[in-house]
Amino acid sequence: MSKARFTVGPVLSFRGVSETGQWQVTALVGVAQGSAFPALVIEGRACAAPKVLLEHGKETILRYDLSCEQQAQERTVRFGAAQGGPQWEFSVPGRDYAPRMAYVSCNGFSDPSGMRKLVRPENAVWADLISNHDSTLRDAGYVLDKEQLWHEARIHDKGLKRFQLLLMGGDQIYFDSIWEDITALKKWVGLSRKEQLAFKVGVTLEREIESYYFGLYAKRWLPDTRRDWGQAKPNLDAADAMARIPTVMMWDDHDIFDGWGSYSPAMQHCELFQVMMRHARKAFWVFQLQHALDDLPPLQGLKRANVSQQDPQYEPIAWGTWLKGDRLALPLLDGQPGFSFGFHIGPVSLFVADLRTERSRTQVMGAATWAAMQAWLGTLRDGEPAHPGSKCQHLMFMSSVPVAHPKLSLAEGLLDTFGQDHVLDSNADDLKDHWSHGDHEGERKRLLESLTRIAEQRLLRVSIASGDVHVAAWGSCYRRDIPPTSNWAQIQQFTSSGVVHPSLIGVAERLFLQLLNHTASKVQSIDVQHCVEMMLFPGFNRYVMPSRNWLAFELDMGGEAGSKLWATWRCETEAGFSNHLQAVHPAQK
């Protein structure tokens, strides 16, 4: 196999640490239907036969097992196609060590015209992330700054790779183009609201919608225009990153279509929206969560009388039973209808929240999901005498939309009054998506109470990783009834977006940016205990940084007092990239 004949992939996915100490990783690969399955090798040994996830059209989607042993110290492992085919490497952390993580969101464009706003190439931010991850992939003229030199000595000079996980917090793919590319949907946009709600989806249109959701992943994640995988020099784009760093993905609205969950109840429940959601869910299950399509149970409406139609109510799914035959299944939380899951990895725990499956204008997560999340928080580890590194010191909560963000009450009121259910106008749904919107304040209060309670009980720090809003920002959620020295009561939020989507750089967007900065200066009182406050962005003297960016999370693995978590934004500038650092200190009473 002289060169890869993949239609998509390899896309690495992290599946957790097994009870026997295996660092579990899978690779999604697409091949032309009817062709022989590629033979992959990991550390010189042949991989087992792949699991077929999907057969659709002219394509077969496969999942390979690349799991390997965690050792006392971190190491780099090599995998790839056998018999001289292309090869890649990924990094495995040492046992009881926290993984070094990169975070990105908004990997695309909601409107192709946005590409004209970019001052640098579309994949410039991806190229910078990959160059920071793997020193062997840098251009000859790549110049290191003083912050990067610090990582050279402890990582790259030892022949190691910087990141062990790539957290992708939403909008990994943009499906908004479906409204233009499918003729029947383009016509639907021009119908009256009454006609839209009454629109029936025929068999032919449903097949076209299904093919679009499955087919766009290959086009966007491994474009036909890219060169062969066997080339001497990689492209340094999203495909390159996902082939080299195991991913942890959760969807947001654009992985379905813009604003999903924030339209009126009538529009959310119309036949067309339900059909599109059903097929977006299937595609997400296969391509982002790397599960076999046959293993996806349907969403079932809650069988209970007098249930409000304002918010979607679904029967919980017993994921542990449903997926018990898949050894590499994600640890989806039992008793929820959505896809929330979590990992415990040495001194770090990572909770990945599904904020879309049950979303409505007045709901972010349903009651069963809240209960499942509370149960999972109860599994955070206190540590074992033989393995002191196993105590959870930092909980990372992935929230696709920010918990801490400037609150635009006037704009909310205007859009609530005049906003329309229009799929090509995202202004109203963008505000309704936020935890800070008035309709979601109750759930935001509940979330902060849950996170600060577990922080106090286990004496740990909670941080939130978020994206969606096309700026870099730093926020703080805290208990004002607790002394500042008890830092467990302070939750830091790190917002990073987008890795491809342009930031607020147009004339109208600059005016909106001024409004954001003005509003951000005001502390938001959630209740008598909890406050949310936007902090001046490190090294910028404004509250939001209008720049494409990515984010690094790294523990310094300190002594008896615990480990400090460093968050480092890399923000795009016209000349290159700037570094912006913030630390989360170990918890203290």
Image (spheres, rainbow, N blue to C red):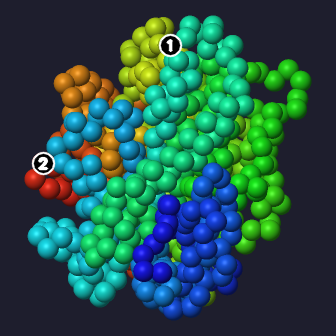
Front-most of 77 and 461? 77
User: x, y percentage for residue 430?
Assistant: 44, 28
Query: Are the residues flagged by discs 1 and 2 in contact, CB closer than 8 Å?
Result: no
Would residue 440 appear left or right of 544 to someone viewing this image? right
* Picture mark count: 2
SS at circle 1: loop
Place residue 522 in its image quadrant: top left
Q: Identify the residue at horizontal 23%, vertical 22% (top origin).
A: 508
Mark 1 or mark 2: which comes first in sequence? Answer: 1
Residue nearest the observer in this picture, 478 or 465 = 465
Residue at the (55%, 70%) spot, across then down: 27
With 157 as the anchor, is 163 left or right in this view?
right
In the image, which disc is placed on residue 574?
2
Q: Secondary structure at mark 2?
A: loop
- Residue 421 visible to the viewer: yes
Q: CA distance from mark 1 to mark 2?
A: 40 Å
Q: How many residues crowd around disc 2 within 10 Å: few (fewer than 14), some, or many (20 or more)?
A: few
The quarter of the displayed image where residue 31 is located: bottom right
Image position of 251 with respect to 438: above or below: below
Residue at the image position 26 percent from the left and 68 percent from the top: 131
User: How far across and down, in percent of the image, does residue 103 sit?
Assistant: 40, 57
Callout 2 amino acid: Glu
Q: Which residue does the numbered mark 1 point to in the structure image?
A: 190
Question: Which residue does the image show at 88% across and 29% down from the upper left?
Answer: 304
